Image (spheres, grey):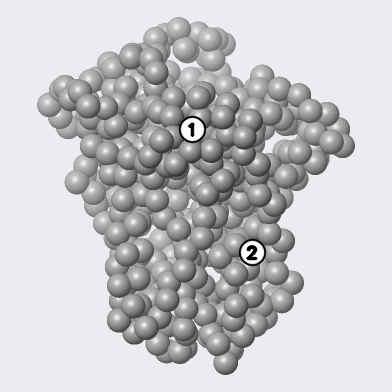
Amino acid sequence: MKRSLVWFKTDLRLDDNETLIKAITESDEIIPVYCIDDANFKTTEFGFKKTGSFKTQFLIESLIDLNKNLRSRGSGLIILNGKPHEEIIKIAKEYNVSKVFAKREVAFEEIETEAAVEKELFKHHIVLETFTTSTLYHAKDLPFAINKIPDVFTDFRKKVEKETSIRAAFNKPEKIKSPKLPDTEFPNLKNLCLQDIKPDHRMAFDFIGGETNAIKRLNYYLWESNCIKEYKNTRNEMIGADYSSKLSPWLALGCISARRIYDEVKKYEKERLPNESTYWLIFELIWRDYFRFMMKKYKNKFFTLSGIKTDKITVNELNPDVLEKWINGKTGSDFIDANMRELKNTGYISNRGRQNVASYLCNDLKLDWRLGAAYFEEMLIDYDVCSNWGNWAYIAGVGNDPRENRYFNIEKQADTYDHDGKYRNLWLNN
């Protein structure tokens, strides 16, 4: 009897999950496991929790859905709590597994965690095998080595679009063989020392975690509502459920894959119509890939003040009162304040809002951009380490931006994207 352990991380799905498929193929039985890592709930050097209530609630919902889908196919999910390098080895020994299958990491802390687990497994002659499951383009298929990837996105995009094909997605398994697994015990916000979420009536979209809801949203956005045909025109709007796909939270936890979205968009183009909007959704997925490959290229540089640049940057000394006003939406700039209040009350703001509040912190307040990135890490329901830190470095001028000064004129932005003041009125006066 050959048993393997499948260590789920930010790949909480059955569909298009190479890690899971390979484990099933090579094993008589598999043990699906997720570890609630203590490190993900600590307070960072910037004074923020790594994981706040909105993101955690979405994670719990995603784990519940994953367990339901696994059990419908003869398996289940074991949830561990603690340090992965301690807990994974315990469960591996308990079930006498010979191999652990997992998603491959690229960010600094995640790589350290993966290495610590591998080290403990090696002591017990258990192999760790990892797979690339997060990107649209597979890293091995890129037309350049990781350390030779262009530092300008347009150069990267043009070359991969011309020379690289996208691999076929894996279908979800119909049957999964596992030994009898215990009932799954799910965490809650209270036992993770987080505050309960108070629903906000102004929130336009109710994000509920899990693969089932990810597929439901994709089908709605493409096929039921036909909203994708206007995506390029509506993507900079700020109120409503359908101005954007809203798929980012599910992508962040891997409840749906970039390849599955791509395949569905291509199917939509074939059956209905290809246009700028359908391409633009794919364009955004390529941006997501790019930040992940940049993180792989530059490693922990994305977490330093100077980012991937060689020149040091200067910032104002931290004034806690100034930072608190930014966090609480009390800066005096109504457009910034509206966005920050939406973020604080819902865990989500539009892409346009994110760029403006980031520019304001970096260029108007001249604070260390990493404070903003760390606050987003705690708050955002769709936090993705590569996209978050890559985007913040971009706005701060220490990332992959060919322009020297990415400054947003906040008043002009407000006039352009909230010309009637409806967004500001919604979050400042209700």
The disc at residue 202 is: none
- In the rendered image, residue 356, in percent from the top left (x then y), is placed at 41, 21
Q: Which amino acid type is shown beneath numbered disc 2?
A: Leu
- Please give the residue where the numbered disc 2 appears in the rendered image: 14
- In the rendered image, residue 312, in percent from the top left (x then y), is placed at 17, 25
Q: Tag 2 or tag 1, which sits nearer the N-term?
A: 2
Q: Front-most of 18 and 189?
A: 18
Are circles 1 and 2 on residues that touch, CB within 8 Å? no
Residue ID at (72%, 45%): 263
Q: Front-most of 185 and 38?
A: 38
Label 1 crowd (10 A; few <14 / some 14-19 / many >=20): many
Residue ID at (65%, 82%): 177
Residue 206 seen = no
Left or right of 269 in this view: 234: left
Considering only vertical position in the picture, is 56 above or below 26?
Answer: above
Quick one: SS at disc 1? loop
Gap in angstroms between the C-alphas marked 1 and 2: 29 Å
Left or right of 355 in this view: 266: right
Left or right of 40 in this view: 421: right
Considering only vertical position in the picture, is 140 above or below 62?
Answer: above
- Please give the residue where the numbered disc 1 appears in the rendered image: 349
Q: Which amino acid type is shown beneath numbered disc 1?
A: Ile
